[in-house]
Image (cartoon, grey):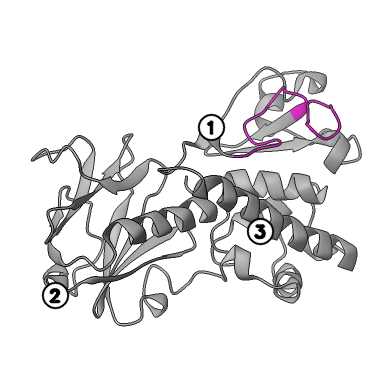
Amino acid sequence: MPELPEITAHAERLERLIGGTMLERFEPLSFTALKTFSPAPELAQGEALRHVGDRGKHLLLGFGDITFVVHLMQGGRLRPDTGKARRPRNGVARWYFGDGQRLLLTEAGTERRAGVWVVSGDPLVSAPLADLGPDADEMTAEQVAAALAEHSMRLHTFLRDQRVIAGVGRRLANEICHRARLSPFAQTRALGAADVATLHAALRETIAEGLADERGRDEMSASKDRPAQVHGRTGQPCPVCGDEVREITYNRYTVNYCATCQTGGKILADNALSRLGVPKEQWGRGRQHG
């Protein structure tokens, strides 16, 4: 799923491409496209695109008092519609502009979770943005410390909880924990002041590096092309210490980590593998997950 660096850079690309252009009409292309009943998308017709922004993992297209909030989910993309097919493959929604340009929201795969919310007024106080935590790249060390103290959970879960920190997903969580040399299973309330400072620095640095990489591209990157020290590198050597990158597999995501860098050499329990009878010394070897 695109995370904060990818969304921010893509908002900047769209701003350069269509900023200031008048909206002619909005067209849902699937039954699941529009997540709101009111206000009507037609209220934005004739308005210029005043701003393309982002909040967490969402894109914001602002037309006058109306904002289209777009969530790409796992397989969604919002791109110029160069083909202009009447029923584009994987089409979710389309925006038509007065100068002939079009934007097309597509979603690959079968989940069909990408969609559009139409919001009147300040979009930050309405669903789906109202319940988000601060954007990860804007949090101070004090805010991170306060959030850690407030929420008792594993660090990896903490980083991915959008109600606590907005914009961080699986890749960033893996990379932040690795850079901070902290176990993904570390308990948030057990982290000391030095750990918090290191975590905050890792959070800012990892996002900044991802954003710099993404800004150098002409379109949103594929997951496999994003910067990674451990994410998606199961069985490969850690670039820092040379130890094997390991994984813990859940139903919908994988945690990658380096035992030498992050857990003092301890191999974390992988319940999925233990249930299959795989010996502990083989955990993390020879299996690839995105």
In the rendering, at what x and y percent does residue 191 appear? 84, 62
Q: Distance between the Cα atoms at labels 2 and 3?
A: 38 Å
Q: Based on the picture, tell me whether residue 37 belongs to the magenta stretch.
A: no
Q: Residue under circle 2?
A: 43
Q: Which residue is drawn at 19% across and 73% down?
A: 38
Q: In this view, does 265 lie above or below 147?
A: above
- As drawn, the label of residue 51 is none
Q: What element does badge 3 sit on? A: helix
In the rendering, at what x and y percent does residue 158 appear? 66, 58
Badge 1 or badge 3: first in the primary sequence: 3
Q: Are marks 1 and 2 in contact (CB under 8 Å)?
A: no
Which residue type carries mark 1?
Lys
Q: Residue under circle 3?
A: 158
In the rendering, at what x and y percent does residue 184 appear? 74, 47
Q: Distance between the Cα atoms at labels 1 and 3?
A: 24 Å
- As drawn, the label of residue 224 is 1
- Front label number (2 vs 3): 2
Please provide the residue range marked out in magenta: 227-245
Extreme residue in the right direction:
264
